[in-house]
Image (spheres, rainbow, N blue to C red):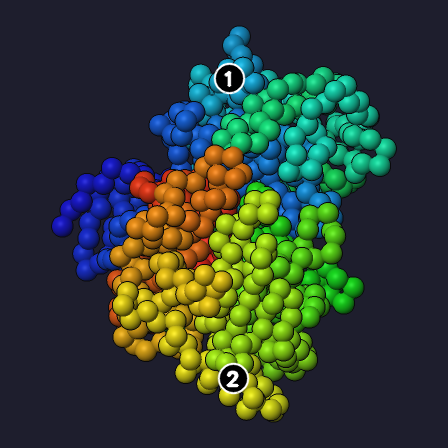
Amino acid sequence: MLIQPHFSLYSGRIECFILALSVQNTKFYYRCRDRAEISVTHKAEWAVGGFMGEADMPMGINFGREVAGDLTQSEAREWLVTNGIGGYASGTVAGVLTRRYHGLLVAALKPPLGRTLMLAKLDDTVLYGDRFYPLHTNRWADGTVGPNGYRHIERFTLDGTVPTWHYACADALLEKRIWMQPGANTTYVHYQLHRATQPLTLTLKAMVNYRDYHSNTHSNGWRMTIVPTDQGVHVSAFPEAVQLNLLSDRAEVTPAHDWYYNYELSEERNRGLDDRDDHLHAATFQVTLQPGESLTLVASTEQKADRDGEAAFKIRRSYDQKLLGLWKSNRPVDAKDIPAFANRLVLAADQFIVNRSTPEEPHGKTIIAGYHWFGDWGRDTMISLPGLTLATGRPEIARSILRTFARYVDQGMLPNRFPDAGETPEYNTVDATLWYFEALRAYYGVTEDDDLVQELFPVLAEIIEWHCKGTRYNIHLDPTDGLLYAGEQGVQLTWMDAKVGDWVVTPRIGKPVEVNALWYNALRTMAKLTRRIGKPHQEYEAIADRIGARFVRFWNSDLGYCYDVLDSPNGDDASLRPNQIFAVSLPESPLTPAQQKGVVEACGRALLTSHGLRSLSPDDPQYQGHYGGDQRQRDGAYHQGTVWGWLLGPFVLAHLRVYNNPTRAREFLEPMANHLHAHGVGSLSEIFDGDAPMIPNGCIAQAWTVAEILRAWLGTEHA
């Protein structure tokens, strides 16, 4: 069979325009324009739906002018690079700022939080021959867009984790790359003139700021201190501020102090928030490049940041290669071919893992729930831990996270989140602590680390004891049936936690189905672990047996699926929601095989979409199929029909459990491979509209979405 494809593959610096593709016994032969032939064996089922690519490389993400040169498309695609301590850089493919969260250096001044916008953007312009080419794009408060630098983007690629632009200016081709130094609040912007017939002059205006990344700047005459230094400037927003160092390896630098007013942030406008921002032009960098020459600009809080762009890029590349090496070395010898899609998720997974040091754990780790605006949340961390760390061959990070969070357990509860400003952690969650047991179970399954279980045992026993006798927010074991009750008026405790003022959108007071599935699994895990380390386990088994016997209360035989909440103030809630899928996907299911099948079928018919499960059935009168508007409108729809990407993972594992068909289960993951080219390029979104075409929204990169899709893929691999 001969297929005439119409696409090109791009991976790293190797570009292959496919002229012919031959399929012989599931072996593909790629004939490239340089007449070389590459033979790569694939499973035939992975040759479609975005899963085809070089097995040893991340999926190539490559946009030409048809996307990069179209403002509507290119500003809807956002890139992200991170530094492992909570800082990041992010923007749009077009280069236009659309969020308050965009910037070339958003530094974590109190790692992993205290995130502060320091370098907003570079206004880059080229003089080539006698013609000026603006490479930057701005949108202003009056609605105008100017200049239109996006029109000169010939190609955008995500090269590993490094966003890369190629600008065509007549016969000149200028490349720009952006990356961050691992472990430091340091961003590199590297330009290289790949092709030209005469010198090219590059001018960069550095636009700086100094504000919390959740806010906007209205300058009102704000004066910063700008001090020239060798090929750079030091910028101090005020005497107590952390200094921003803007440095180059070869440019001429001219200090400045000019405010640019009223940038329009279209995504903030869409969210009903302040959509105006001001930035300060602090310095101009200029250099004339000959063909083959380069310029590196460094933005850093470090006084002695390395200006050697080539060496810094090698460090970044080596770091990414190490991640892929750990992942591949963790695969079984007889593992099936790994699609490039999975390799891409491994790189995306690392962006969420950051440092959180404590006196007892100076090298502690945690997980950022999502970019741009989330910090480290207990629930999200525990749900994401198996997929982000264990699946990627990094169990030592899982161990560190488990130890770090154990130190914050209070009254038998893990914190829901650590506030950005460093205040006392908040404990308004019933499920984060139960997900902790599931994360520990997964970790132990990989490592059999009895030492950690021994260390954590007092904390684990304390958690169970508090839940049995009662802790905050009326969380307690109901002595009549052994099920876990939680909730009180005005508090949101489950993952469906939207709250606007005093309005809790989905209070779910009572006995939520997923909470009790987790409670049942936590007790089973506790019994197994205590047995392994020689501790008394009979009590935990007895409570679990009782829950297993009474879990039948959740089954609604008339509707053929589970109640969402039992014993709520308004009775039993029969709303068709996805929470019941965990009663099938978790390792220990308290449902019968027939009931498990009923749950999967009900969720598949009413809740399943290409990118996850709806949070409420479209047949429910409370259903909202579009997520948007101001905060009240958005939060009102957040769990009332909005699709959640992370839920696709549990659905796939539940489907696999019921039907034992790995090929069919894996098919549900294919649309997520395509989604890597949209919204947060190279990562997976938080949420999507419930109504077709399921437009992505929320965070452009969400930890538990990446984690659960990767974990589900591995689950189908090992089935």
Image location (x, y in percent) of residue 220: 74, 20
Image location (x, y in percent) of residue 190: 59, 33
Question: Residue drawn 50% across and 44% down?
Answer: 635
Residue 653 - label: none
Question: Residue drawn 33% across and 43% down?
Answer: 691
Which residue is nearer to you in this view: 233 or 594?
Answer: 594
* Residue receiving disc 1: 143
Could you tell me which secondary element the residue under label 2 belongs to?
A: helix
Point out the residue furthest to the front here.
570
Determine if residue 364 is in view: yes
Quarter of the figure with residue 489: bottom right
Instruction: State the quadrant of the C terminus.
Output: bottom left
Residue type at the position of mark 2: Ile
Quarter of the figure with residue 437: bottom right
Image location (x, y in percent) of residue 380: 55, 58
Which residue is nearer to you in this view: 283 or 579?
Answer: 579
Could you tell me which secondary element the residue under label 1 belongs to?
A: loop
* Residue receiving disc 2: 543
